[in-house]
């Protein structure tokens, strides 16, 4: 399917404030305004995300929930700059990213956003430590500092001693912990996780959720998940439910 460039709503050329601040407060971790994503192929038109406007504040632990085809993964990809909106705007850590040049968008992803994927996406020829330090390497962090930061994080998340193992020698839960380490070791403003527990058993899923909740509390990192896992939905302090590309419920709990 091709991505449509014809906006269904207001013009995408409408001006935006690059560094949005509400009432003098710190910018939201994420903010969207009338966000659309349309895919078109031949005579088929799919409105994957339909006019979504919402805000996620710094330090939140949020689930985007909904059935398959609801648009939750597409919305996550729009927030992470992995795909561009057909129309509307999206801000990450105060900067509008939807219209950025590719080079600037890549820099935002490297410096401000961490990603955790369902299939882990570890490089099979790199060790656990080399996978976890990869974003630091791209940032030009010296080798000694990279190793120190990763080793401290591995100790914290319960996989110390596995630094030199290749991904094929790790369990699914261990691989996902390496993926979480890779996402947070650079201290991003935002971590986006797409079905992070989908390939794990119940006990391993619960342990991973505990880990991410702990990192959220202690580091203040904002976590946003796309999931249908009831365990993760139960632990999240906010559940945003999507159906057919639109938000139909936004529930918060203390």
Image (cartoon, helix red, strand yellow):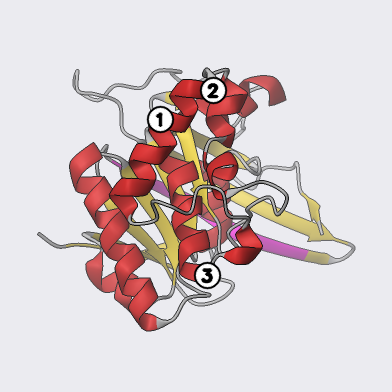
Which dot marks residue 143? 2
Report which quarter residue 204 is drawn in: bottom left
Query: Distance from label 2 to label 3 (Cα)?
Result: 27 Å
The magenta stretch is 45-56
Query: Viewed as shown, does residue 116 lie left or right of 105?
Result: left
Label 3 element class? helix
Work out whether mark 2 precedes mark 1 in sequence or the reverse, and give the earlier one: 2
Q: Circle 1 sits on which residue?
A: 148
For residue 7, above or below residue 62: above
Toward the viewer: 78 or 186?
A: 186
Task: Determine if residue 181 is in view.
Answer: yes
Label 2 element class? helix
Query: Viewed as shown, does residue 229 lie left or right of 26?
Result: right
Front of the two marks 2 and 3:
2
Front of the two marks 3 and 1:
1
Q: Circle 3 sits on which residue?
A: 172
26 in magenta: no
Work out whether mark 3 precedes mark 1 in sequence or the reverse, and give the earlier one: 1
Report which quarter residue 48 is drawn in: bottom right
Query: Distance from label 2 to label 1 (Cα)?
Result: 9 Å
User: Which residue is at 58% across, 59% downward?
Assistant: 120
For residue 237, above or below residue 100: below
Residue found farthest to the bottom = 202
Work out whether mark 2 precedes mark 3 in sequence or the reverse, and give the earlier one: 2
Q: Main secondary structure of the magenta part?
A: strand
Q: Are marks 3 and 1 in contact (CB under 8 Å)?
A: no
Query: Distance from label 3 to label 1 (Cα)?
Result: 24 Å
Toward the viewer: 10 or 173?
A: 173
User: Which residue is at 21% across, 59% downward?
Assistant: 237
Q: Quadrant of the N terminus?
A: bottom right
User: Which residue is at 44% across, 39% downward?
Assistant: 33
């Amino acid at each position: 399917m091709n991505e449509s460039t014809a906006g269904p709503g207001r013009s995408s050329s409408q001006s935006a404030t690059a560094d949005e601040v509400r009432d003098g407060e710190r910018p939201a971790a994420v903010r969207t305004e009338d966000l659309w994503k349309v895919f078109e192929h031949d005579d088929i038109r799919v409105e994957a995300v339909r006019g979504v406007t919402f805000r996620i504040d710094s330090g939140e632990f949020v689930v985007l929930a909904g059935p398959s085809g609801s648009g939750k993964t597409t919305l996550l990809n729009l927030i992470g700059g992995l795909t561009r909106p057909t129309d509307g705007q999206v801000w990450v850590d105060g900067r509008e990213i939807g219209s950025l040049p590719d080079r600037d968008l890549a820099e935002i992803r490297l410096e401000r956003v961490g990603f955790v994927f369902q299939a882990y996406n570890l490089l099979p020829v790199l060790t656990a430590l080399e996978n976890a330090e990869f974003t630091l390497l791209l940032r030009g962090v010296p080798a000694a500092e990279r190793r120190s930061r990763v080793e401290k994080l591995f100790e914290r998340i319960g996989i110390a001693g596995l630094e030199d193992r290749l991904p094929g020698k790790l369990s699914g839960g261990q691989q996902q912990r390496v993926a979480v380490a890779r996402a947070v070791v650079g201290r991003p403003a935002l971590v986006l996780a797409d079905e992070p527990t989908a390939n794990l058993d119940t006990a391993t899923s619960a342990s991973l959720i505990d880990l991410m909740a702990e990192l959220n509390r202690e580091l203040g990192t904002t976590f946003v998940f796309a999931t249908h896992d009831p365990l993760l939905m139960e632990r999240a302090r906010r559940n945003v439910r999507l159906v057919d590309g639109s938000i139909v419920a936004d529930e918060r709990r203390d």
